[in-house]
Image: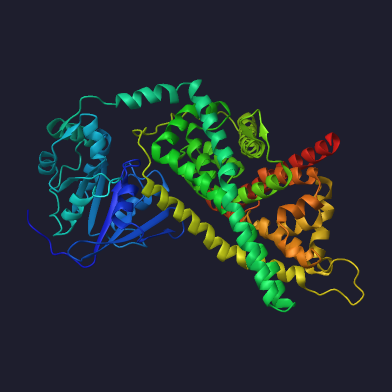
């Protein structure tokens, strides 16, 4: 092959179908030398990393979102298309397209490779999961495939330490020549079948082990039981495993607060540091272990290939409730954050189905709610065993998640009743092969989640904690003051004004104050409560008192359960509402969604509060 002069540094874009192991290969190539952000104007994730080839050449590696075609049907595919065509405003045209294909599923993945070939760019094809293909008896003649395609083809095993050695050797040279063009009107599926006939021997279309597992996992009865058992186990583990780590963080925060208080004279600076910054941010940091444990299980389920199977399993129930089967993935994404969940509705073609999914996505319990749930459950629900197996706190957390799901289904049923007939669209989703999650990829995913959380704690939560301290400290009480000092402050006045509205559902003025910064991010309500109660408390030991103990001493069980019910439904996150406005293009729909969710939250809190008072 002829050679092309190599620019420095080399710019490579990883591109391929979803579930091809592209991100695992990206992690193998770049390791810790990567950064994650969002593309400007959209919430599509942007991953960029750096690597150094044996020759010393620096390489910039861009992990593009998974795509099935350059005919984009989603924001993810649109970003991939624009970068590959050199039309993206934030990216330069890459020097090389590194196409990643699942070696066990070339019949599907080669079609996209052939479509990328038409772009006339230097390319390399990485046949990933080559070991899994060999175990299934799939024989791929990479030399014949390379001759037919006109560019290098190498085997990779992204989950192994030396699994990318052949790829790195191929990159550490000259760019391959531009592959020969094929007819623009050629049938890509037919061309892919011809390539497979020439270069691939595939004895079985599906792994026997995969087929055996799927007979149980996708069974209409056993599959649902397995799904329920998995989810219940996850919520039990969130409490059972996180306890020791939380105790250590809480002790460390308490020690830091005590040291600051002991070494600074009493005054504004000491109050700001101890009651504002340490109590505010520390009150949220203590829940980091629970969030990481929850995301650990989400990553395991995703990496193993279980989540697409759960989507197929629940498809008929989604349609029966008035939602499109395509709504499952956006709703599942909303358990991490409602914003990417709402953005994911762009893959739903029917406008009515898409709007209904946007409205119910905020009802899924996002990770930002978890600190609030964990705080109140830990303070008011005893840690005891039920039926000799289940932890009561884990059961309550599971019930809160289910309450959000039930609320979403009720909204969908009402929308189905009054919104017209549901459009018929079959759910088309690739079922990947079962695989063991790679510990390296799990570690990188958890590290990214931890850094996102810590950045929020160090920026947004810190800033709001300082703001809340100012509101809770000024103006100072008059000379003849008799009530706690905070009641004379701006926060005290605001809280008492709002308490008139929220008193029927059991909220005191301190809760009302904490709800205000919680509009920026739900978890900030925890730091708000920590700051308010740290400042409001009297005596030397106030800063050492755990927030949960303070709440348990001053709130009734009815108030705690009412606040939990509020957070199941309330649209507390302004960023979520802004995305609804952007995605629907309608202020009227955004206001209606806000009113609907707030009304549901108030009604649920009122019902829970009154029933709890009646029963206790």
Residue occupying image coordinates x 40% and y 21%: 215
Left or right: residue 555 compared with residue 455: right
Q: Position of residue 154 (x, y in %)?
A: 18, 46
Q: Please tell me which residue lies in front, 522 or 317.
A: 522
Q: Position of residue 252 (x, y in %)?
A: 60, 62
Q: Is residue 614 above or below residue 374?
A: above
Q: Position of residue 476 (x, y in %)?
A: 81, 75
How many numbered marks does the figure carry? 0
Q: Is residue 128 above or below residue 507?
A: above
Which image quarter is the C terminus in?
A: top right
Left or right: residue 78 compared with residue 111: right
Residue occupying image coordinates x 67% and y 36%: 392
Looking at this view, name the residue that lies furthest to the left. 1
Q: Please tell me which residue lies in front, 371 or 187.
A: 371
Residue occupying image coordinates x 39% and y 37%: 304
Colour pattern: rainbow
Q: Please tell me which residue lies in front, 67 or 269.
A: 269
Residue 602 in sight in this render: no
Residue 280 in sight in this render: yes
Name which quarter of the figure residue 19 lies in. Answer: top left
Q: Position of residue 442 (x, y in %)?
A: 41, 47
Name which quarter of the figure residue 282 lies in. Answer: bottom right
Left or right: residue 453 compared with residue 385: left
């Amino acid at each position: 092959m002829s050679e092309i002069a190599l620019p420095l540094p080399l710019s490579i874009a990883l591109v391929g179908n979803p579930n091809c192991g592209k991100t695992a290969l990206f992690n193998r190539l770049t390791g810790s030398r990567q950064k994650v952000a969002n593309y400007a104007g959209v919430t599509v994730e942007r991953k960029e990393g750096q690597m150094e080839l044996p020759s010393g050449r620096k390489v910039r590696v861009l992990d593009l979102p998974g795509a099935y075609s350059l005919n984009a049907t989603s924001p993810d595919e649109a970003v991939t298309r624009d970068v590959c065509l050199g039309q993206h405003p934030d990216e330069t045209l890459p020097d090389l397209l590194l196409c990643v294909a699942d070696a066990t599923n070339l019949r599907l993945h080669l079609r996209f490779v052939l479509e990328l070939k038409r772009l006339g760019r230097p390319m390399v094809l990485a046949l990933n999961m080559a070991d899994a293909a060999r175990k299934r008896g799939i024989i791929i003649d990479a030399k014949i495939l390379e001759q037919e395609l006109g560019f290098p083809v190498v085997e990779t095993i992204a989950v192994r330490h030396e699994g990318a050695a052949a790829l790195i050797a191929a990159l550490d040279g000259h760019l391959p020549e531009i592959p020969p063009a094929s007819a623009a009107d050629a049938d890509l599926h037919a061309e892919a079948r011809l390539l497979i006939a020439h270069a691939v021997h595939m004895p079985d279309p599906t792994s026997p082990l995969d087929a055996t597992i799927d007979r149980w996992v996708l069974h209409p009865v056993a599959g649902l039981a397995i799904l329920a058992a998995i989810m219940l186990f996850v919520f039990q583990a969130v409490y059972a495993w996180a306890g020791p780590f939380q105790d250590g963080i809480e002790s460390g925060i308490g020690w830091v607060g005590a040291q600051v208080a002991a070494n600074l004279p009493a005054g504004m600076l000491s109050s700001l540091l101890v009651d504002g910054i340490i109590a505010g941010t520390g009150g949220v940091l203590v829940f980091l272990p629970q969030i990481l444990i929850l995301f650990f299980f989400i990553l395991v389920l995703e990496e193993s290939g279980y989540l697409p199977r759960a989507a197929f399993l629940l498809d008929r129930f989604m349609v029966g409730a008035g939602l499109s089967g395509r709504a499952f993935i956006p709703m599942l994404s909303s358990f991490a954050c409602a914003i990417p969940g709402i953005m994911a509705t762009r893959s739903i073609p029917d406008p009515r189905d898409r709007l209904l999914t946007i409205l119910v996505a905020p009802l899924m319990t996002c990770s930002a709610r978890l600190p609030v749930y964990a705080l109140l459950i830990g303070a008011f629900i005893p840690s005891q065993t039920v039926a000799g197996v289940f932890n009561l706190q884990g059961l309550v957390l599971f019930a809160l998640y289910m309450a959000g799901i039930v609320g979403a289904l009720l909204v969908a049923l009402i929308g189905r009743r009054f919104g017209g007939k549901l459009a018929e669209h079959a759910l088309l989703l690739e079922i990947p092969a079962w695989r063991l999650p790679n510990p390296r990829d799990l570690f990188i995913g958890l590290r990214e989640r931890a850094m996102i959380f810590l950045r929020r704690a160090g920026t947004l939560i810190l800033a709001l904690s300082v703001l809340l301290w100012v509101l809770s400290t000024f103006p100072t009480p008059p000379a003849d003051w008799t009530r706690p000092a905070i009641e004379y402050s701006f926060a005290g006045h605001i809280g008492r004004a709002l308490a008139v509205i929220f008193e029927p559902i059991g909220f005191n003025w301190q809760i009302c104050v904490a709800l205000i910064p919680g509009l920026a991010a739900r978890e900030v309500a925890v730091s708000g409560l920590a700051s308010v109660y740290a400042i409001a408390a009297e005596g030397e030991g106030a800063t050492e008192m755990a927030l949960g103990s303070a709440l348990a001493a001053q709130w009734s069980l009815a108030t705690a359960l009412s606040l939990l019910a509020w957070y199941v439904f309330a649209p507390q996150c302004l960023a979520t509402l802004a995305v609804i406005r952007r995605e629907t293009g309608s202020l009227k729909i955004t206001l209606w969604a806000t009113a609907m969710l707030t009304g549901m939250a108030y009604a649920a809190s009122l019902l829970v509060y009154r029933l709890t008072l009646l029963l206790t």
